[in-house]
Each structure stands twice: as structure tokens, then as C-alpha cells.
Amino acid sequence: MEEKILNLLSEEYPEIDFTASDELVDDGILDSLTITGIIATLTMEFGITIPYEEIVEANFNSVAGLAKMVERLSE
């Protein structure tokens, strides 16, 4: 799942190195507009709904965090 998400996001956001940090939000690599776009991308690709309470730094700081969230919401 991590590799699929990494490939998807790398295509959508080629200017961002999603492997550069495990703290993408904390390091300022992802801003609120980019996070909104990521939410839309994941929603469309995986057919999930990401509720407000899931939009936290822990879920968006790394591709691993995103993968865990997608897997959890896909159940």
C-alpha cells in the first residue's frame, strides 16, 4: 500500500519528495492546500471518505502514516 500511495502522490506532486522526511507536515513540506489535494486524490483513488478527525499530523507526516490511514478506512 505504501508503494502504491508513494507512486500516486509522486505523479500528482512531482515537486515534492515524499521520502525526504517522516515529518512532512511538521517540516513544512506539506501545507494545508497540498493536504486538501492529497485527501481528494486518496478519496478518488481508493473510494474512501476521510473524516475530519482523521486529518491529523500523524496521518499525513509520512507515506507510511497515509497508508495506515487508507488501510484503516478501507475496512
Image: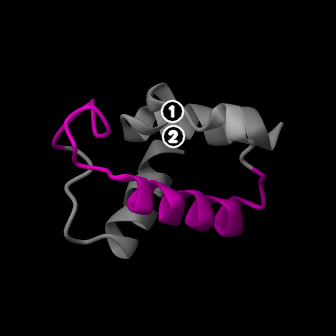
What percent of the width, then of the height, locates residue 11? 36, 74
Frontmost residue, 31 versus 11 = 31
Relative to 38, say whether 27 is above or below: above
* Residue 66 numbered tag: 2
Q: Is residue 61 left or right of residue 73?
A: left
Q: Earlier in the sequence, mark 2 or mark 1?
A: 1
Residue drawn at x 42%, y 62% as measured from the top left: 33
Is residue 40 part of the magenta span, yes or no?
yes
Quadrant of residue 47 in the image? bottom right
Q: Secondary structure at mark 1?
A: helix
Which amino acid lies under the numbered mark 2 shown in the image of this protein? Leu
Residue 66 point in image, percent of width and height = 51, 40
Check if residue 59 falls in the magenta segment: no
Looking at the image, the residue that sits furthest to the left is 20
**Are the residues tagged 2 and 1 within 8 Å (C-beta)?**
yes
- Extreme residue toward the top, this view: 58
Q: Label 1 crowding class (10 Å Cα cut-off): few <14, some 14-19, many 20+?
A: some
Q: Please tell me which residue lies in front, 22 or 8.
A: 22
Q: Residue at x 65, y 42 (%)?
A: 70
Q: Nearer the viewer, residue 38 or 63?
A: 38
How far across and down, in percent of the image, does residue 22 sit?
A: 27, 30
User: Image check: 68 left or right of 29?
Assistant: right
User: Residue drawn 69% across and 61% down?
Assistant: 43
Q: Residues within 10 Å of mark 2 (few under 14, many from 20)?
A: many
Residue placed under numbered mark 1 in the picture: 59
For the record, the magenta segment spans 20-49
Q: In screen coordinates, is 6 left or right of 53?
A: left
